[in-house]
Amino acid sequence: MFVSAFDISKPSRVQIAGVPSGHEARVLAEIALRVHGQPVIHVALDDVRAAMLAESLAFFAPHVEVINFPAWDCLPYDRISPHADILGQRVNALARLMEPFKSPAVVLTTVNAIGQKTLPPEILQRSSLGVSVGDELSVDNLSRFLATNGYVRSGTVRESGEFAIRGGIVDLFPTGYESPVRLDFLGDEIEAIREFDPLTQTTTGKLDALRLRPISEVLLDERSMAHFRSGYRELFGAVTESDPLYEAVSAGNKFPGVEHWLGLFYPRLSGILEYLPTSPVTFDWQSEEALKSRWQQIEDFYQARLSLYQASKRAK
């Protein structure tokens, strides 16, 4: 059972009850079929529920595209970053939402994710890079793009978000791809793009083109870093050399938990609904009550962090 508000042209609220357990996906698919040129957004109670709906949709409606937009897997105001796979899923989902929809689609998200802000569409748009065989692109420029968008340079590429440079060969594991790729350069021209096995390092296939996107919602380009420094000084005053977060960001390096400072990197933040302003939205039963509970939890965590900060200021 879930609550649905699915006719945007006629603002209304419809409650659908009595849906047998496991068959909610069939109703979601029917709604998706009635909406043209845009997906349905469904807000599940939690990740377990979202995963169950994804499996059911794959069974009942394999023709319906499913886009997963999860919440961070860490607590509000935490000191650790969300898992890289979670960040990659979120960025890829947002990027997909800015592309045209020619067939039915459902965006599966959760109560925790729907109430969480992210980077705005215009900033994500400018942070994507398409490369194709035959393109002119220097290794140095590609390296700068990767570093700015959260990729980590390593000796051997094995995990998502890593890249390595060996002369005219660039290995990288783009977010959203199942395997890493190897770009062969002849001067500044891309001669070939090949998929390879991260364990054996042997070629497994060829690609004509590649779409590179950030691996994190925090972009460490000049504009975002300048915005962070300005906002940070405005909040906390003069910064000393003993502030590791400020120093790391100023140097263009990722700091553990930096995603929790997301609001300082951009002039504004957006919710997923801004990416799809006219899409119908459906909710799991009791998800609205769960959303209110989530807001209260965030407030509690905020007050706890604020108390610690104020206590540290008094102790100085």
Image (tube, rainbow, N blue to C red):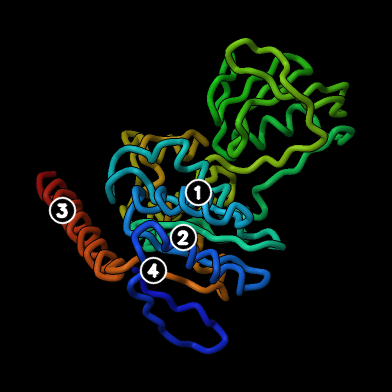
Secondary-structure class at tag 4: strand
Secondary-structure class at tag 2: helix
Q: Which residue is mark 1?
A: 90
Q: Residue at x 53, y 82 (%)?
A: 7
Foreground label between 4 and 1: 4
Q: Indicate the amino acid at tag 4.
A: Phe
Foreground label between 2 and 4: 2
**Mark 3 and mark 4 residues within 8 Å of each other at the beta carbon:** no
How far apart are the two marked residues, 3 and 1, measured between alpha carbons? 28 Å
How far apart are the two marked residues, 4 and 1, measured between alpha carbons? 19 Å
Position of 288 with respect to 305 (left or right) is right
How far apart are the two marked residues, 3 and 2, measured between alpha carbons? 39 Å
Numbered label attached to residue 168 = none
Mark 4 or mark 1, earlier in chain: 1
Image quarter of the N terminus: bottom left
How far apart are the two marked residues, 2 and 1, measured between alpha carbons? 22 Å
* Mark 1, other Cα within 10 Å: few <14 / some 14–19 / many ≥20: many
Q: Indicate the amino acid at tag 2.
A: Ala
Q: Which residue is mark 4?
A: 283
Mark 3 or mark 1, earlier in chain: 1
Q: Which residue is mark 3?
A: 304
Q: Indicate the amino acid at tag 3.
A: Ala
Question: Does residue 121 sit above or below 220 in this rendering?
Answer: below
* Mark 4, other Cα within 10 Å: few <14 / some 14–19 / many ≥20: many
Identify the image quadrant of residue 39.
bottom right
How far apart are the two marked residues, 3 and 4, measured between alpha carbons? 30 Å
Q: Residue at x 74, y 38 (%)?
A: 210
**Mark 3 and mark 1 residues within 8 Å of each other at the beta carbon:** no
Question: Does residue 224 sit above or below 196 in this rendering?
Answer: below
Image quarter of the C terminus: top left
